[in-house]
Amino acid sequence: MDRNELSRRMVSGPVVFYRRVSTKAQAEGDFRHQLRALKVMHPRFRITADRNLDLKEVISGYASPEKRMAGKLGVGLKFLHRNPDAIMVVTEADRIARKAEIFERIDAQGLGGRVVDLSSGETVSDIIRAGKHKKIEEQFLAHRKACRTGIRRYQQSGGVLGRKEIARESQKGSARAQAIACERRDDVLRVVGKLAIENRGRRSSLAQVGDRLKDLGIRTGQGLFFTPLRLTQFKKRHGTKWRYAEDSYRRPRMRIRRKILSFQIETRRKRNASRRVARLDNLTRFQTRIINRVRPADTDLSSHHPYFNHIRHSLPVQVRFQTTRIRH
């Protein structure tokens, strides 16, 4: 890209300033160094949240393409797709990646002419045409091989790597990793439950769950996207919790329905009990009225009341005793 054109676009924007380091120890110093280098080359550039995008990432430059596209580099490329006038800038070409495949993927998306190395003024397309992306990878592999050879020689000569506290620190790191994994699991299950509520109880496909997790920025422990295959493995590990999350729409409604049904059953039971008591009271009053109508001089009560014998046998024992035949 022409220097004048680059300067104009750096001022007019929008610009994605991408900064990458390999380790957390490098983050504080190298991020500041890359910003100073940018200010030296383009003093008029300002990082404004409403116009430009500042992306910082701690990740190996030789990480897999899938992991890189799931990180901040993928966020910056999406920003370029949404904003046709935007460009992405880095202070050096190896800040983009140390793997040639990453450069080729950026160029395959049609963004090779909009990702610029400020130190040389070359775009990713220019770097690929010159074959510099492969040289960056070769230099990195040679440097890594030399480091490993030096460590091996140091150990063979009696050198000791590590510290005595490494066991205790490993336990703390393992506990921290387990806590992070539990938080990630809860985030995924929370998304599954929200989708179930939005779909009114209908189960969402694994592809829909993966797309929602991707939009929310939730990644696997390795920093990768949740694909249907990875979600299938996740579902096998947490089957009970997954089914509980899918039941988020139906479960509260069933709870309310059970409460309503139990209330109706209890109300019906009380109503039937009160009706039964009322019927027994009416029957007792009716039978008592019949007994009171019978005169003491009568020798045969059934002659005056044809249904008296039927009623008498339905009376309690104490009342039935009073209705026996009376003689003078």
Image (cartoon, rainbow, N blue to C red):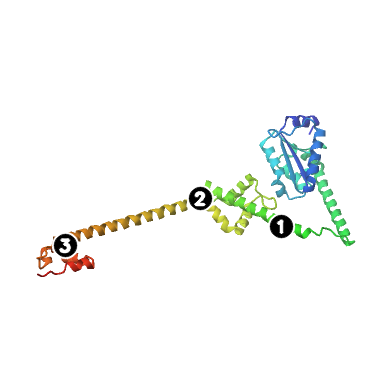
Say what secondary structure mark 3 lies in.
helix
Mark 1 and mark 3: span between their CA atoms?
Answer: 90 Å
**Residue 131 visible (yes or no):** no
Of the residues shown, which amino acid type is indicated by label 2?
A: Tyr
User: Mark 1 sits on what residue?
Assistant: 174
Q: Is residue 212 left or right of residue 138?
A: left
Of the residues shown, which amino acid type is indicated by label 1?
A: Ser
Relative depth, front residue between 105 and 38: 38
Give the vertical position of 325 relative to 277 (above or below). below
Q: Residue at x 78, y 45 (%)?
A: 27
User: Mark 3 sits on what residue?
Assistant: 291
Number of residues whose C-alpha sits closer than 10 Å to that of mark 1, classed few (under 14), some (14–19) or many (20 or more) = few
Q: Residue furthest right?
A: 157
Q: Is residue 153 left or right of residue 6?
A: right
**Residue 301 visible (yes or no):** yes
Label whose residue precedes the other's in the sequence (1 or 2): 1
Q: Residue at x 75, y 50 (%)?
A: 63
Say what secondary structure mark 1 lies in.
helix
Say what secondary structure mark 2 lies in.
loop
Percent x, y of residue 296: 11, 65
Give the vertical position of 4 relative to 77 (above or below). above
Mark 1 and mark 2: span between their CA atoms?
Answer: 35 Å
Percent x, y of residue 82: 66, 37
Give the vertical position of 216 relative to 171 (above or below). above
Number of residues whose C-alpha sits closer than 10 Å to that of mark 2, classed few (under 14), some (14–19) or many (20 or more) = some
Of the residues shown, which amino acid type is indicated by label 3?
A: Ile
Q: Is residue 282 left or right of residue 106?
A: left
User: Mark 2 sits on what residue?
Assistant: 249
Q: Residue at x 74, y 44 (%)?
A: 57
